[in-house]
Amino acid sequence: MAQQQPRRVLRVAPPGRGGARAEAERGEEGEAVFATVQAAVDAVPVGNRVRTVIRLAPGTYREPVYVAKAKNLVTLSGEAGSPEATVITWDNTATRIKHSQSSRVIGTGTFGCGTIIVEGEDFIAENITFENSAPQGSGQAVALRVTADRCAFYNCRFLGWQVTVTSSSATLLPCWNIAIFIANQRVTLLLTAGNPHQKLLVMCS
């Protein structure tokens, strides 16, 4: 029998729960429960060497998320099993960035405006929608920016109007039936919707 790899499990409370109180709660199996996705990511140790699974309750999380370079082996997992049920959304654009991190950390312009920015290696996301909700005509507005190796997305959706997904010097592992391999180069996926009244949808399932 294969030896089970050690792992850590954290939970994020459903959106709208009391902030400070939620961070002090414990889940049914004793996991720490956090008020926001970012709070759970921040709890991952620097230089992490244990797969850390952050379980998200169904709902819409209105916040930007930053997975720092030293936060490796992080998994964001939507508990509902359907990407439509768990959504992380924010409305930054290349010319207007609202974020808890400074521009010196996340960058500026298109590089720094992602709803989720992943710099930690071996990142996995499953059963989640990542959305940049900036309205049409706002300019470049990234849903996902990845600058880390060996990242994988399973049963995920990426929603936005322009420059939905960007990757720089990263290797993305297969997204179930869709695989994107990028190595040692700046690659930006410029994605446009055929119907100007509908947001672009990239489905990985």
Image (cartoon, rainbow, N blue to C red):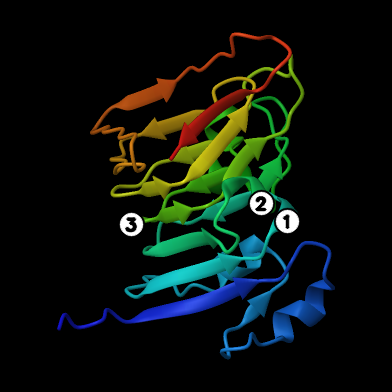
Left/right placement of residue 154 relative to residue 13 reads: left
N-term mark: 3 or 2: 2
Residue 173 in percent (x, y) is at 29, 44
Mark 2 = which residue? 85
**Quarter of the picture holding the C terminus:** top left
Q: Residues within 10 Å of mark 3 (few under 14, many from 20)?
A: many
Check the image and report above or below for 195 versus 141.
above
Q: CA distance from mark 1 to mark 2?
A: 6 Å
Q: Are marks 1 and 3 in contact (CB under 8 Å)?
A: no
Residue 102 visible in the snapshot: yes
Q: Position of residue 200 (x, y in %)?
A: 60, 22
Give me the C-alpha separation between circle 3 and circle 2: 24 Å
Q: Amino acid at mark 1?
A: Gly
Give me the residue at 70% from left, 36% from top: 97
Q: Residue, x 66% and y 22% (percent of image)?
A: 199
Upstream in the sequence, badge 1 or badge 2?
A: 1
Indicate the position of residue 187 as horizontal and vertical percent values: 36, 24
